[in-house]
Image (cartoon, helix red, strand yellow):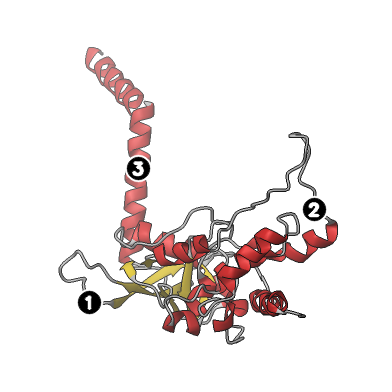
Amino acid sequence: MSTQLSEETEAETETERIETPGDRRRAEKKARNEQSTEAQESPETDEETVHLKVFRYDPEVEGKMEPRFDDFHVPLEKGMTVLDALMYARDRFDTTLTFRHSCRQAICGSDALFINGTQRLGCKTQISDLDGPVRVEPLPHAEVVKDLVVDMEHFYDQMHSVEPYFQTDDEPSDELEEQRQSRENREKIKMSTRCIWCGACMSSCNIAAGDNQYLGPAALNKAFRFAMDKREGEDMREHRFETLDQEHGVWRCQTQFSCTNVCPKDIPLTEHIQELKREAVKNNLKFW
């Protein structure tokens, strides 16, 4: 009788031990690991994947100094973007894979890449819109720092050279009064304000590739935004055209439309540059 009670007590104790929260978590983890092992041993052959061919280069690691392409097969999901696929490849297959990204909403401009031979934003480019394998490279005409990351310093220098900020001496008398702008003038410059400094247009420009001093489409578009803003006044406008109306300014543009074609914000960059050319000519006309 005592032996039977002892066995029942041990069984009850064992049951209680297994049912503790900690044991349940460990049991669930063990089950997941077993399922993962089974999946690796018998992979699903009907799972749809996307084939990525990703440019790799690391100048600081021996054996990786020679540029190459690595292949990744990422499970395809509905609505997956190139950035999503890259993040999956980095997190699941190779944590050394390096690329820039931030907002994932086509606003920050940090993930501009050369995808299937065209400058695009990784977060805006749907895998379903591309032919496979998806080839991902860093932006052309820029020094590669590592993998898909390029040096943007020259691009930023060109942008800052056109003084991309509002300047005026004609301020309202009341400090609480707004610096008003007409609806017509706002419409004129509206598209130029959408630039996100991604560098895709600069990378696509053959002139910028061969002329390191050329301001480039992004900087010229930013100059257009302020040169055409009537709130700055004529004196400031003339000052801006002194920068634009020079050998490596608007006159280097050969109207190839490559910048307009790749702009992720659909800014009519070439049209803006051509209008700056017309305004530069008018600015230099003398009738005496």
Q: Which residue is mark 2?
A: 181
Residue at 70% x, 55% y: name it.
Answer: 232
Residue 240 place in picture, x, y as percent: 61, 65
Label 1 close to label 3 by CB (< 8 Å): no
Give neighbour class at mark 1: few <14, some 14-19, many 20+ (Cα, 10 Å): few
Give neighbour class at mark 2: few <14, some 14-19, many 20+ (Cα, 10 Å): few
Residue 218 place in picture, x, y as percent: 56, 69
Q: Is residue 87 visible?
A: yes
Give whichever of discs 1 and 3 has the lower sequence position.
Answer: 3
Q: Which residue is mark 3?
A: 29
Above or below: residue 192 compared with residue 66: above
Nearer to the camera, 99 or 73: 99
Element under label 1? loop
Nearer to the camera, 42 or 224: 224
Nearer to the camera, 211 or 193: 211
Looking at the rendered structure, the kind of residue marked 1 is: Glu
Q: Which residue is mark 1?
A: 66
In the picture, measured across the screen, residue 59 lies left or right of residue 227, that is left
Looking at the rendered structure, the kind of residue marked 2 is: Gln
- Measure the C-alpha gap from mark 1 to mark 2: 54 Å
Looking at the rendered structure, the kind of residue marked 3 is: Lys
Mark 3 or 2, closer to the camera: 2
Residue at 48% x, 60% y: name it.
Answer: 110
